[in-house]
Structure formats: structure tokens, C-alpha cells
Image (cartoon, helix red, strand yellow):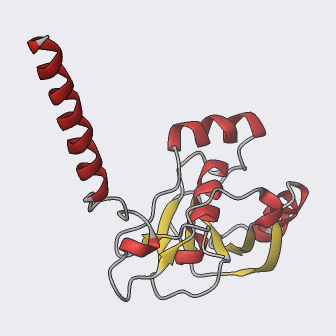
Amino acid sequence: MRALVVFGLLAVLAVVFVVVAILRDTQSKAGTAKGCPKGWPLADVVLHEQKDVKINVLNGSDQPGLAGSVADDFRNRKFQVKKVDNAKAVNGVAELRYGPKGVGSAHLLRAYFLNDATLAFDIKRKDDTVDVVLGGSFQQLATTTEVNQSLGDLGSPVAPPGTCPAPDGGK
């Protein structure tokens, strides 16, 4: 009988301890807009479908017409191509320029370059468009299978330093 009383008392104490721990949890708002420091922009960390991604395709290589042909390739893959133009030369395969509202879109686009694109995050940028600047080492966009494999390797989009993940995708 005494053991039953001790066991019951320990069970009640355990339940009380768990309830107090849950109610006093200070980390419950971490990683959301509610726990975000004042003045930090919200980052859209949702991995969007191609049809919802807005891009500008810019030619930063010495290959004439490259931006136009790659823009057509992106259009065929259902991306919203807003602008096709030239840009200052960039090294490497490509450079992705984006702001807090373009984090998820830039993450998806990285997969089209097999994570070989340089990221250029601008915390002051206000739009959700990603500038895709093609470099001199660009060959072609990845296939659907390669994109899916690359997305698996990359994992989920993460809010860049100085931003907080928007709970609703930044909309």
C-alpha cells in the first residue's frame, strides 16, 4: 500500500513538472516572426513551385544571346521570366541575387545550377524576384531528375542571417 502511495505521488509530481515546463517554455517562439528581433525583415522560406517564381535572366558572360535562350528554357519550365538583359560579367556558373522575399525562390533556383551558383543576398531588397546572372562557366540548366536530387541534397530553405522566417511564407 505504501509503495502505491509513493508511486502515485511521483506520478503527480511528474505531471506537474511537465505542465510547468511546457507553460514556461521560452523557445516556443524561436524561429517565428513572434520571436523575431525588432527591425529584422521576414524571409520567405517556402519552397515555391516554378509557376510562382519570378526571375530576371541576365547575361553576365561573353556569349551573345545566352540570357534569351536560358530565359526561354526557364519559361518552358513554367517560371515567370520578367526581364531579359545583359549584366556586368560574373565569374563561375551563375549568381543569384535576391532579397528576403526571394529566399525560397533562390533556393529552388540553386538546384537548377546543381548548387553551383553563387548566392548574393541583399537584406534591403524589397521584391520577390530573383536575378539570375549567367556567368562564363554556364553550360546548361539541370534536368528535372538532377533538380530533384539537388533539392534533396540542399534540404529546406533557411532564413539568412539578420532575418527571421515568415510563418506564412512572407505573404
Q: Depth check: give the residue in front, 56 or 148.
A: 148
**Taking 51 as reference, is 6 left or right?**
left
Q: Is residue 132 left or right of residue 79?
A: left
Is the C terminus in the top left, top right, bottom left or bottom right quadrant?
bottom right
**Residue 5 horizontal side relative to residue 90, left or right:** left
Image-based side of 35 in relation to 56, left or right: left
Pinpoint residue 122: horizontal percent, then vertical percent.
47, 80
Report how many numbered discs are placed on residues in the image: 0
- Measured as percent of width and height from the top left, residue 50 is found at 78, 58
Residue 107 % position (x, y)? 58, 57
Q: Nearer the viewer, residue 36 or 57?
A: 36
Specify the quadrant of the image occupied by residue 72.
bottom right
The residue that appears at 16% across and 29% down in the rendered structure is 9
**In-front residue for pair 90/20:** 20
Q: Residue at x 9, y 14 (%)?
A: 2
Q: Position of residue 56 (x, y in %)?
A: 72, 76
For the point 87% across and 62% down, which residue is it? 75
| Relative to 71, residue 152 above or below | above
Q: Kindly identify the residue that appears in the image at 45 percent across and 65 percent down.
A: 159
- Does 80 appear above or below 38? above
